[in-house]
Image (spheres, rainbow, N blue to C red):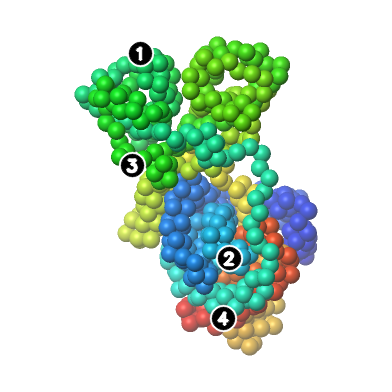
């Protein structure tokens, strides 16, 4: 028993120290339990097959798809517009919207999504961003509205089921979350005004290597004189190739890209790309939408000559403002600068062969302060010229692998990762609703972990990610390994009698004062441990202790387990206690003492409220 407790204490100290990654510490603890033969290999590895761990992997994928499709950002932006210029209304909306999203998506992902939105809103409202960013982080943890809101919720559900009690429903946490958000909002409203309003939270622009996609579009005027033309059944160019049309020579027009509807029977399994690269061999089909740049007069002549339909009656400037001008789902743009030793110097753009060798188009040339956008095929390139290239993201990546002839400016693939697949947002919303329905309605014979796996697979199969690799990247493997490796620790505590010893100590020390005192002891013990160990690891360790303590005094363990889950999530007194707290620290220019001033009172008040409220919601 004492060896197990020693391993636990050493692990806690290493978690608190932070010099060694938390997943490595957890694996070392797991190895120690194996070396001292406290656990068998099967018992030690049981956490990696636990349904909670598998469910968390699926939730990472589902949450990543919600972000990748821009669904969460779309909802958040529309709701936050309601705030206007009112500081109090903006504060309340940030709390409510963040908590609402946090009820279905991981708190880390919620903060990562909301952080830039809140900073931009604060700037437009001429408000100090530091007043909002710490509440943003705290609200993401307060949104305990659903079973999947945080891993500790799933941990106590699993503990109840394994102990022979009835498991929790999807919305069992809803009243608890409602109270947490209400208390948190009431407490934070004055605390942030007293301690954070005078902080320098202005959001300065960080140094960036390269320009964003929107900056490139604006700089080269790609949205100027841009028109969308649709191929009709009566159109004369249907079935013709781009080289046959020769629109650049005849009309001075440049076809930038083609949007093509998917007509395949395999759309569900493999959706086709909404954008098509334009090459001389591209054959135009019915319903194709051409993105054409050039003068309006020439465009009108082209439309009449080939019987096309002009889709937008609005001006190109309005199209750009509405975000309808250019998208970068599959086809992107990037700048490359020619090296002085390049063999391409003094060759024409046609002779350079970018289209044949790399399947990319040249959209423009920047030479000193001059932008060359017309008759590019016959332009000769000079040393130091910056070429704006267009192609699929994979082909642009190929360009960056050749550093002898040119250098790709910035990080185009990093910019591509920021582009949301917003045309997939309705699909992601439908899948999320389907997942929630399968988890909420008991008449659907699907286990929660199965529902999450189905939702994760559907997100991948319906193209809510660019590729499968992007889905894997959304999974935080450090968290998964940490949880899976720490779960057997609770088994070791029970097997060696350490869990019973700790629960007996709590019961003998506080049990005589009644279940309220015992639950308060469990709550604040969990709250203290969460400041040094991850909330999930703390919940895994304290859940069996809370259950044993309740059983020993012959009361229902449900409120005790809820105390563990809530205390594990409501940790605000340290910037390192939860990832959301750490995420907002640099943007809000917070110090450690800021978290003590604002977070510690909130954490204590929340604990006091929960100790009295939980027994009312879930009687002993």
Mark linked to residue 607: none
- Residue at position x 52%, y 78% in the image: 614
Q: 257 and 487: which one is in front?
A: 257
Cα separation, mark 4 vs mark 3, equals 57 Å
Cα separation, mark 3 vs mark 2, equals 35 Å
Locate residue 169 relative to residue 405 in the image: left or right: left
Q: Check the picture and name the quadrant holding the N terminus.
A: bottom right
Cα separation, mark 3 vs mark 1, equals 30 Å
Of badges 4 and 1, nearer the viewer stands 1
For residue 366, above or below residue 245: below
Locate residue 9 relative to residue 143 in the image: left or right: right
- Residue at position x 27%, y 22% in the image: 306
Local secondary structure at mark 1: helix
Local secondary structure at mark 2: loop
Of badges 3 and 1, nearer the viewer stands 3
Local secondary structure at mark 3: loop
Locate residue 83 relative to residue 565 in the image: left or right: left
């Amino acid at each position: 028993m004492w060896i197990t407790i020693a391993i636990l204490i050493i692990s806690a100290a290493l978690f608190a120290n932070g010099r060694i990654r938390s997943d490595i510490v957890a694996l070392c603890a797991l190895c120690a339990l194996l070396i001292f033969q406290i656990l068998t290999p099967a018992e030690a590895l049981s956490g990696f097959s636990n349904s909670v761990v598998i469910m968390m992997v699926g939730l990472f994928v589902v949450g990543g798809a919600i972000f990748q499709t821009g669904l969460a950002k779309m909802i958040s932006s529309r709701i936050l517009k309601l705030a206007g210029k009112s500081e109090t209304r903006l504060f309340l909306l940030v709390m409510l919207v963040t908590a609402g999203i946090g009820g279905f998506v991981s708190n880390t992902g919620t903060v990562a999504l909301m952080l830039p939105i809140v900073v931009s809103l604060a700037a437009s409202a001429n408000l100090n961003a530091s007043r909002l960013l710490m509440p943003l982080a705290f609200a993401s943890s307060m949104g305990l509205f659903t079973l999947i809101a945080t891993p500790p919720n799933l941990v106590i559900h699993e503990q109840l089921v394994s102990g022979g009690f009835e498991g929790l429903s999807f919305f069992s946490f809803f009243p608890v979350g409602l109270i947490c958000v209400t208390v948190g909002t009431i407490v934070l409203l004055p605390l942030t005004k007293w301690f954070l309003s005078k902080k320098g939270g202005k959001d300065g622009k960080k140094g960036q290597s390269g320009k964003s996609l929107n900056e490139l579009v604006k700089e080269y005027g790609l949205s100027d004189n841009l028109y969308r033309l649709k191929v009709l059944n009566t159109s004369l160019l249907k079935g013709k190739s781009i080289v046959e049309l020769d629109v650049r020579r005849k009309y001075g027009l440049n076809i930038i890209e083609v949007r093509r509807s998917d007509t395949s029977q395999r759309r569900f399994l493999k959706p086709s790309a909404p954008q098509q690269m334009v090459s001389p061999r591209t054959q135009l089909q019915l319903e194709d939408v051409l993105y054409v740049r050039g003068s309006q007069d020439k465009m009108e002549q082209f439309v009449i000559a080939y019987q096309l339909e002009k889709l937008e009656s609005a001006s190109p400037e309005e199209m750009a403002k509405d975000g309808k001008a250019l998208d970068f789902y599959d086809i992107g743009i990037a700048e490359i600068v020619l090296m002085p030793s390049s063999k391409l110097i003094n060759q024409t753009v046609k002779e350079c062969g970018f289209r044949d060798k790399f399947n990319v188009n040249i959209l423009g040339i920047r030479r000193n302060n001059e932008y060359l956008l017309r008759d590019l095929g016959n332009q000769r390139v000079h040393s130091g010229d910056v070429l704006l290239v267009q192609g699929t993201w994979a082909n642009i990546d190929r360009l960056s692998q050749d550093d002898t002839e040119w250098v790709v400016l910035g990080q185009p693939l990093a910019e591509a990762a920021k582009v949301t697949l917003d045309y997939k947002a309705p699909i992601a919303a439908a899948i999320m609703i389907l997942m929630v329905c399968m988890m909420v309605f008991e008449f659907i014979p699907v286990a929660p972990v199965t529902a999450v796996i189905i939702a994760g697979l559907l997100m991948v199969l319906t193209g809510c990610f660019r590729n499968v690799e992007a889905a894997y990247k959304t999974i935080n493997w450090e968290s998964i390994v940490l949880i899976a490796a720490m779960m057997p620790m609770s088994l070791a505590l029970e097997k060696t009698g350490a869990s019973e010893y700790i629960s007996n100590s709590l019961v003998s020390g506080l049990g005589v004062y009644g279940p309220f005192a015992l639950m308060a002891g469990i709550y604040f013990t969990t709250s203290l441990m969460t400041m040094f160990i991850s909330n999930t690891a703390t919940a895994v360790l304290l859940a069996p202790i809370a259950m044993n303590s309740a059983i020993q005094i012959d009361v229902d363990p449900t409120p005790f387990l809820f105390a563990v889950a809530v205390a594990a999530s409501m940790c605000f007194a340290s910037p390192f206690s939860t990832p959301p707290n750490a995420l907002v620290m640099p943007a809000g220019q917070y110090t450690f003492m800021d978290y003590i001033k604002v977070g510690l009172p909130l954490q204590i008040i929340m604990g006091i409220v929960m100790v009295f409220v939980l027994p009312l919601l879930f009687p002993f």
